[in-house]
Image (cartoon, rainbow, N blue to C red):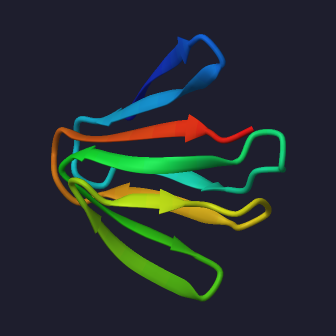
Amino acid sequence: MMQTIPIQHGIIGGTVYDFPVVGDVLPMHTHTEADVHISIVAKGSFRAHGDGWERTLVCGNVVDWPAHYPHEFVALEAGSRLVNIRKA
């Protein structure tokens, strides 16, 4: 089961998501201008997808999400880690 760790360093905040099992999911969601983020694949790999698109993300990939853009992450490797940092 996916585990979350909130992070806060001054004005920079976000969440670390650990996916211990292949197939663990961060469910489909969107963000407003107030909580939109970038995603950094820190370990492992993911299938990211949304309305009409799909992409494989690997360690080192960075995605700069726009507000109101649906997205979901599915772990492709055990022990994968995703770091989201809020932009607002």
Q: Is residue 16 left or right of residue 59?
A: right
Name of the residue lying farthest toward the front: 10
Residue occupying image coordinates x 16% and y 45%:
78
Q: Residue 76: percent from the left, percent from the top?
A: 23, 60
Q: Nearer the viewer, residue 88 or 39?
A: 88
Q: Residue 56: percent from the left, percent from the top?
A: 31, 73
Q: Is residue 6 above or below residue 77?
A: above
Q: Tell how many labels.
A: 0
Q: Is residue 10 left or right of residue 56?
A: right
Query: Within the image, what quadrant is residue 16 found in?
Result: top left
Q: Quadrant of the C terminus?
A: top right
Q: Is residue 1 visible?
A: no
Residue occupying image coordinates x 18% and y 50%:
44
Q: Is residue 65 left or right of residue 3?
A: right
Q: Nearer the viewer, residue 38 or 20?
A: 38
Q: Residue 48: percent from the left, percent from the top?
A: 44, 67
Residue occupying image coordinates x 75% and y 40%:
35
Q: Quadrant of the N terminus?
A: top left
Q: Residue 27: percent from the left, percent from the top?
A: 56, 52
Q: Is residue 83 above or below residue 70?
A: above
Query: Within the image, what quadrant is residue 57 found in?
Result: bottom left
Name of the residue lying farthest toward the bottom: 52
Q: Nearer the viewer, residue 44 or 14?
A: 14
Q: Is residue 66 visible?
A: yes
